[in-house]
Image: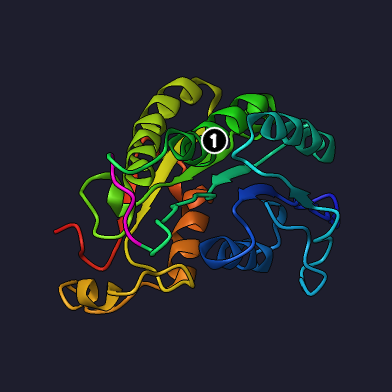
Amino acid sequence: MFGETNLTINKEQKTALLTGASRGIGHATVKRFNADGWRVLTCSRQAFDERCPFPGGKENHIQVDLSDPKQTIAAAEEIKSKLNGKLHALINNAGISPKLADAGRMNTLNTDLHVWGQVFHVNFFAPVILARALKHELAATKAAIVNVTSIASSRVHPFAGAAYATSKAALAALTREMAHDYGPMGVRVNAIVPGEIETNILSEGTDEIVQNLALRRLGQPYEIADAIHFLCSDASSYITGTEVHINGGQHI
């Protein structure tokens, strides 16, 4: 040996972009990634909440209504300006599921075409716009994209509306197409498929569904966040084009 050299290894802080960050699964995901040292850029319709405890939260927040494609395109440019040419994860979590005035299910007969457009812009087209706009930043890190679909994408659900269900089914198909197209860049694209998760948007009567689940309980937002984190980590480096069902056995 010719002596010892003290080497300091500077670990690059990873950056994630998360839509639908203000509550439920989105908020739990921010907490999970923040706990692991990630910088998280958050997108939501709401302005930044000053009660947010995460460092740099205000500077990393983008207020955008994803149902408006012009706003989404503008937000993509704002996001690019906040990145140093690198993005390690894109998590398309935002989703809307409108109900009738009496909280009833919106089906193919009673859903206004304007509502169909709103739902698809948020649930389907926003992921397309963001992924395309940020493809160079994603490719620079051989990043991961995670699309959040729904158990309603594969069956008629008693509460989720037709526009929501079909938009999530389209997002599942988009996941496969994106995995094919982004794969040569080294970018992995997967989807998670949540079932009944305990958030404040659950519909009355969900308890009847839970009685028939294999695990007989609701899922927790942190359980979805953990799965998203896994799909964005090196532990899933050879997984792409996959849907991960997280529903307590609802699909069996």
- Few, some or many C-alpha atoms within 10 Å of disc 1 (few <14, some 14-19, many ≥20)? many
Q: Locate residue 169: give its quadrant.
A: top left
- Would residue 198 be seen by someone viewing this image from the given angle? yes
- 186 horizontally vs 55: left or right: left
Residue ID at (40%, 36%):
171
Give the image location of residue 143, x and y in percent. Answer: 59, 37
Residue ID at (84%, 60%):
56
Quadrant in which the C terminus is drawn: bottom left
Q: Locate residue 172: give its quadrant.
A: top left
- 25 horizontally vs 136: left or right: left
**Which residue is nearer to you in this view: 204 or 189?**
204
Residue underneath mark 1: 127
**Which residue is nearer to you in this view: 46 or 140?**
46
Q: Locate residue 141: give its quadrant.
A: top right
- Would residue 215 be seen by someone viewing this image from the given angle? no
Judge whether 48 appears above or below 187 on screen: below
The number of numbered discs placed on residues in the rendered structure image is 1
Residue ID at (28%, 39%):
108
Give the image location of residue 24, x and y in percent. Answer: 53, 67
Callout 1 secondary element: helix
Judge whether 145 appears above or below 229 on screen: above
Give the image location of residue 10, x and y in percent. Answer: 80, 52
Identify the amino acid type marked 1. Pro
Q: What stretch is highlighted in magenta?
A: 104-108
Give the image location of residue 220, x and y in percent. Answer: 42, 73
Judge whether 58 appears above or below 89 on screen: below
**Which residue is nearer to you in this view: 28 or 9?**
28
